[in-house]
Image (cartoon, rainbow, N blue to C red):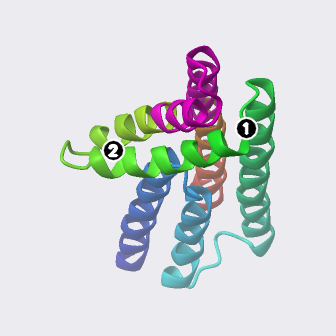
Amino acid sequence: MILEIIALIISALFFLAGIIITIFGIAGSFVVLLGAVLYDVITWSWQISPRTLLILLGIACLGEIFEWVFSVYGAKKFKMSNISIIGFIIGTIVGAIIGVPIPIIGSIIGAFIGAFLGAAIFSFIELHDVQKALKAGIGAFVTRIGVMIMKLFLIMIMLVIFYFAVFV
């Protein structure tokens, strides 16, 4: 009984960490998967079958594939150049770091603002056109939100599967 409680606490921490790092654009679904595997390892119960773990792995991989596809689609739809995409990535990282002094929400807001500013600034440097730069920045912002929502949805599906494997 005590092992199950410890395993649930550790898994819950991994699940929370997975959700948080997904917001920053990191592969949080694999952290959620690791939390499910740790539950099985700690309890030695194999309540989560290998088949279920493979399904969770598939969903985690699907999330990463979707992120890549939607990022490429968003970049094409908003006509972002390679330079704008580099600015998007750098801006997301720098914005998240700058937002750290404001607990939790600061890094999230910083990542979104940084994505917008990074894409817009790099696009402006490349094209010297404010309208195209703003379009690239908006495209980066919208793409970032869409990808994050989709990945969080997949993580919620993973958590429901974990719940049913352990408690039902």
Residue type highlighted by circle 2: Ser
- Residue underneath mark 1: 81
Name the residue nearer the viewer: 54 or 146: 146
Q: Position of residue 26 (x, y in %)?
A: 55, 56
Name the residue nearer the viewer: 110 or 27: 110
- In the displayed structure, 157 sits above or below 124; it is below
Q: Residue at x 56, y 61 (%)?
A: 32
- Which type of secondary structure does the marked residue at label 2 adopt? helix
Discs 2/1, front: 1
Q: Position of residue 91 (x, y in %)?
A: 47, 44
- Residue farthest toward the top in the current orientation of the protein: 131
Mark 2 or 1 closer to N-term? 1
Label the magenta part by its dominant secondary structure: helix
Residue 126 lies in the magenta-colored region: yes
* The N terminus: image quadrant: bottom left
Taking the image as shown, residue 93 lies to the left or right of residue 65, namely left
- In the displayed structure, 117 sits above or below 162; it is above
- Residue farthest toward the front in the current orientation of the protein: 128
Residue type highlighted by circle 1: Ser
Taking the image as shown, residue 106 lies to the left or right of residue 127, namely left
Say the numbered circle drawn on residue 107. 2
Asked if disc 2 and disc 1 are in contact, CB closer than 8 Å, the reply is: no
Say the numbered circle drawn on residue 167. none
Q: Residue at x 55, y 35 (%)?
A: 125
- Dividing the picture into quadrants, the one containing residue 46 is bottom right
Q: Residue at x 70, y 58 (%)?
A: 60
Q: Which residues are magenta?
A: 117-145
- In the displayed structure, 117 sits above or below 62; it is above
Q: Position of residue 77 (x, y in %)?
A: 79, 25
